[in-house]
Amino acid sequence: MRFCLLNTFFPPMHFGGDAIFMASLANLLAGAGHEVEVVHCADSFHLLQGAVSPSPFPLDKRVVVHTLRSPFGKAAPLTAHCTGRDWLHASALERILQRGFDVTHWHNASLLGAPAAFRWGSGLRLMTLHEYWLICPSHVLVRNGEEICTKRTCYSCTMNRGRPPQFWRKKGVITGGLENIDLFLAPSPFVKQMVGTYLPDLPMLVLPHFLPSQPAPAMERGKYYLIVSRLERAKGIHTVLPLFKENGLPLKIAGAGEAEAELRAMAGGAPNIEFLGRVPFAELPALYRQARATIVPSVCHETFGLVVLESLQQQTPVYVTPHGALPELVAQTGGGRVFRDVDELRRMLGEERPVMADLSAFAPQTHLRNYLEIISAAKSDQTKCAHV
C-alpha cells in the first residue's frame, strides 16, 4: 500500500514524542514493503525552535520526505494557527496529497492548515491524537500553562500564554473539518474518553504507540535519577526540583525547551542537579540503563508516555504522576509507581530495583498487525457504505 504520513514536525526538526513516533511508524511500514511518504513543515519548527537544536533520528532510506518551506517563512505556520488553513503552503501540500495514496494519515496537524487541509488526500483518512488539539487551543489541557484545565477559559488562557487567538474554533467549523477524517486513533483509553467527552460523535479506536527495539547496553546501574522531557511548565519539572535541592540526590535532566532558563534558576547551581541539554536519540538507552529510576512529573494529561516505555525497556523503573495515560501504562506494564505529590515521591526514592516489565503489547510487529487490521476493516466499511 501507499501511505502518506503528515505531521507538523519531523526529525531532525522536531521536539520529541509525536515526531519520533511517526518516524518509527514510517520505518516500520517501509520495512514491511509499503511505500511511505512523509510531509512536515520546516517553517513551523523555526517558529517555535527557540534554543532547541535539531535532533536526528535514523530513517529508512526508502521513506520519501517532503519538507514544506515558504518564502514567507514563519508567517506560514502563524497564519495556519490563526485561520485554521495554511494559505502559504496550500498549493504544495495539495499537490503532494494528489499523488494517489491508499492511506492518508494525519498526526499533529495543527500548523499544517488543519482542519481545512483535511479535505485533501485520497484513500482512507486517519488521524492519530497525539495531543488534545481538537478540544484545546493550547493542545495540552493546561490552563495558563500552570494547572490541569477544569473550566473552559480558552480565550484568556491562550492570551495569557502569549499565543494568538483562534477565532475559527467555533464548534461548527472544527467539526465540519473533522468530517473529512474517516477514523481517529487514540494512543490510550484515557485520550479516547477525554476527547469523546467533548466530541462524542467522532469515530475513534484505541491503538497504543509502539517502542522500536533498542539493545540494552551492558552497563552498571548508576546512582542518579533521570528526567527525559521537553523543558516546559506542563511537564512539571519545577515541582520536583526543590526536593532534589533538599535531599542532595543526583538528578540528570535531558531535554531543552522554553522553560530551561527558569528551571536552571530554580536549581540555583546545585551540584547534584545536572542539565544535559538535548540528548541524541541513540544515546538515550545508555542514559536510561544507568539511572536508578526515571521520573515523569507531568502536571498535564499525557496522551501516552513513550519515555515510560523507553525507560522500562532498559529495565529502569519509572515514577509517574497520576495524570492522563501515565497510570494506565504503569498498571499495564507493572514497571513503575504513581506518586500523587512530592511527599510520596520522597518516600519512594531509594526503594527502586531494576524491573522486567511486560512490553509485549507495545512491540513493533504487534502495532503493525493491529494498524493494518484497522485499515483493512475501515476500508471494508467504506466499500460497504459505497454500495448502500
Image: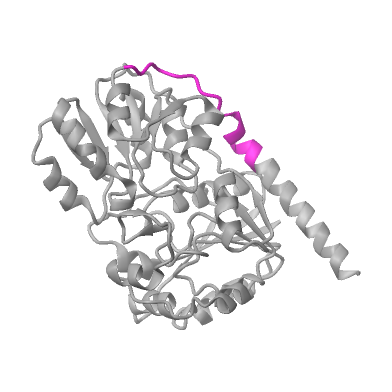
Residue located at (47% from left, 34% from top): 309
Q: Is residue 357 magenta?
A: yes
Give whichever of 154, 358 is nearer the camera: 154
The x and y percentages for residue 20 are: 45, 48
Residue at the right extreme of this rendering: 388
Residue 85 magenta: no
From which residue to which does the magenta span run? 351-367
Viewer-proximal residue among 277 and 69:
277
Please state if 375 lies on the left or on the right of 126 as rendered.
right
Residue 244 location, quadrant: top left
Does 189 sit above or below residue 48?
A: above
Report x, y in % for residue 182: 70, 64
Is residue 327 at least partly visible in the picture?
yes
| Count of residue discs | 0
**250 relative to 41, above or below:** above
Q: Which quarter shows the N terminus?
A: bottom right
Residue 116 appears at what percent x and percent y?
56, 77
Decide if residue 128 is in sight here: no
* Residue 325 percent coordinates (x, y): 50, 42
Q: Is residue 376 above or below residue 331?
A: below
Write down the quadrant of residue 196 in the picture. bottom right
Instruction: Residue at 44% x, 35% y: name it.
Output: 308
- Which quarter shows the C terminus? bottom right
Residue visible at 68% across and 64% down in the picture = 201
Residue in view at x 53 percent, y 75 percent:
93
